[in-house]
Each structure stands twice: as C-alpha cells, then as structure tokens.
Image: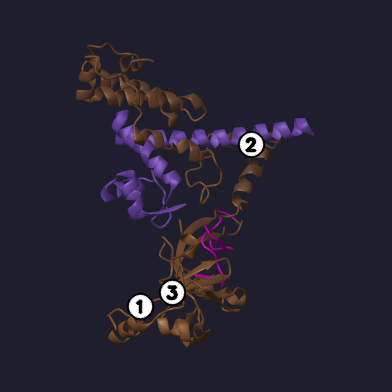
Chain colours: A brown, B purple
Amino acid sequence: MKSPYEILGVAKTASADDIRKAYRALAKKLHPDLNPGDKKAEERFKEIAGANDFLSDNTKRAKFDAGEIDAAGTETQASRERQYYRDHAQTQQQPRGNPYANQSAYEDFASEDDLFAQIFRRQAEQTRNAKGADVQYRMTVEFLEAVAGASKRITMPSGATLNVNIPAGIQEGQTLRLKGKGQPSTGSGGAGDALVTISVSPHKFFTRVGDDIFLELPVTIKEAIMGGAVKVPTASGSVMLNIPKNSNAGSTLRLKGKGVAGKGDQFIKLKIILPTKPDPALDEFLSKWNPDPSYDPRKEMQP
Amino acid sequence: MIIAKTEFLVRSKLDPQTLEIWVSEQWLIPQEDAFTEADLARAQLIQDLKHQMGVNDEGVGVVLHLVDQLHGVRHAMAALLESARNKNNN
C-alpha cells in the first residue's frame, strides 16, 4: 500500500504548505468533474483527497511518522458518499431537463446541411419533446383513511398543492401515480407524473392483514361466561355483537363483510379482563365455589 | 428528486447569502427555489474549485462555462456514435 506521502508525491519532511500545494496540483488534474470521461479519475481523486486529509491532520501525521498507525481507511465518509456533477450532466433524465446544457461548442458543425447536422437537430428535438421528469413523494395516511379511502393534499416544494385521492383499501408501501403532476417538460413533451408512496400509520386497536381487520376485544368475566350483546367498534362504526355463552379467552368471532372496503371480514379475539378493584361479592362467591374436578386448565402440562 | 431550499442549504453546507450570489451569477439555476441532486453535485464542484484548487470567483464562471460546453460536446458525441452504431448494425 502506498503511503500518503507517496500518493501526493511529497517528501516525509514536506511542510504543511508543500502538502497543500501538491494536493492542489493533483486535484486540478484529477477532479472527476474536470475529467468527465475518465472513470479512474474518481478513484485517484478520492485517494489524493484522503491522503491530503490525513496529512493535514497533525496528530494523525505525527502518529503515522512514529509508526503507530497506518494510513488505511483514509477515505472519509463524505468522500465515499460524494456524487459528482458529471454523473448528473451525463444523464438526460434530469427532473427538468438540463438548464446548464450548452451546445455552443459544436453549433458551427450543426449548421451544415449534412448527416451530422441532422443528428444534432434530431437530438435537440428529442430533448425538447422529452416528457418532464417524474417526482417522488411520500405520504402517511391514518389507518382508517387507508381502509375507507380519503382525499388528501400534498404541498410541493414550489408551494403549490396537489390533491391525492387515496382509494379504499390501500396498503402500506403502495405507490399512486398521478398522471401529469410531475415536472413540466422543457419542450412539448408534457409533464411527468407524481409518484406518491403511501405509508399507513398504525391504529390504537385495529390491525390489518390483507383485507381482514383484527381486533382484541376486552370483555368481563360475566360477559364471557353468560354471553350477551356488546358494542364493538369496526372500521365503519360500532355494531352490536352477540357473545355466545361460555366464550373462552382467546376465542375468535367473525363479523362478515366488516373488513377492508367490504371485501374482508373483521375478526374479534376475546380478552377477559378482571375488575380493576377487588370485588367482595366475586371473592365471596369464588371462595365458596367448588368447580368440577375436570376443570383443570393445566392438565396437559403435567410433567 | 426535488430538494427544497432549506434542505439544499444544509446538504451543501452553504449559507443563504452565498447561495443567493451563486444563483444570481447563474452558477446554479434552480426552478422557483426547488433544487435537484444535479444542482447539489454542481455546488460541490464549485466548492472544490474555490477551496481546494484556489480558483477565484472570476475563474469559477469560466470553468463552469467550459464544463457545460464539454458536457454538450460529450452528448453530441454520444449521439453521433449511437447513430453510427445503429447504421452498422442495420
């Protein structure tokens, strides 16, 4: 592995100023944006930038000179994530065409009436006729809005608002395409689309799997044993549900057609909740109560 | 992806006054305060030119103009080659 001194081509005794000068000279030659066609330029530029950062840090340089550390990993986080202008200028698909595009360097060729001129003209026309770019948005909707559908608004960076119609039953991660709501074309190509990715925020007590809605319903001991009608929330308002006599904890009841968008069902799992305060009447009853010996919920669990 | 002005300032580490000057010089051409990743990469190039290569403000405009022309030529070149290749294949 090359030492940072070798990378910058300076002596070990070089002053901070020498290092800066050497780095500048190499940076001018190797900056990827000044070498748009040279794929290796980026690697070499990162290498010299890393070496420069390393040697500009006096503590690191002293430790390296003393042999305490090596110069591995000189590449900084920032230089790894760095993107270069050339990568954007090279693609035609920029969100609003390329405002920096400049044809002046070959316009004189294009004025001739020959094959090359035709190609240049066609290229310019394609740029003019290209559709505007698609724009990505993210949007969070409430659980019940996702179930029943809703009409929402997005404020775009330009300040304009965009109406988004959320269809009933939309799923987490689904993307809506709003035709023609993206960036305008620079020419006659028509606007791009707005792509809105939906995330659904969780509900306090409903959960959802596909088109079915699940709910854990707390009931009293008496309701579980004696049965009876109780009020149950659904995505479309409350309904009365008849709990059968002797419904055990964890048993599941189904409300047909009360799922998402009329397609799925709602499933209700019973959860027996004791009184929050001790109930003397219940205590008295249970202390006198002698259940049938076959009532042993742990009989399968004998070791 | 569109970047709002506030996010652009954070990611480019520019202060608002400097950004205003760069826009008025047309070094950057945002659309109604909406920036793109390309604008961000361009801002980083300008910072490299100024701070790492010692290019002064007059020089930055010259360099950007030539870089833009170079990309124009590269596009034209790519189109020419593409068309020549298509002819050969037919």
Identify the amino acid type marked 2. Answer: Ala
Subunit under mark 2: B
Q: Label 1: which residue?
A: A274
Q: Nearer the viewer, mark 2 or mark 3?
A: 3
Amino acid at dot 1: Leu
Range drawn in magenta: A163-187
C-alpha span from label 2 to label 1: 77 Å
Query: Which residue is painted at 57% across and 70% down in the image?
Result: A212
In the depicted structure, whether residue A112 falls above or below residue B22: above
Q: With A65 as the anchor, is A154 left or right in this view?
A: right
Q: Chain of mark 1?
A: A
Residue reaching furthest to the right: B90
Residue at position x 60%, y 59% in the image: A190
Q: Residues within 10 Å of mark 1 (few under 14, many from 20)?
A: few
Q: Secondary structure at mark 2?
A: helix
Residue located beneath label 2 in the image: B79
The residue under label 3 is A271
Q: Which is more toward the observer, A269 or A255? A: A269
B46 relative to A56 in the view: left or right: right
Q: Answer yes or no: do the residues labelled 2 and 1 have beta carbons within 8 Å?
A: no
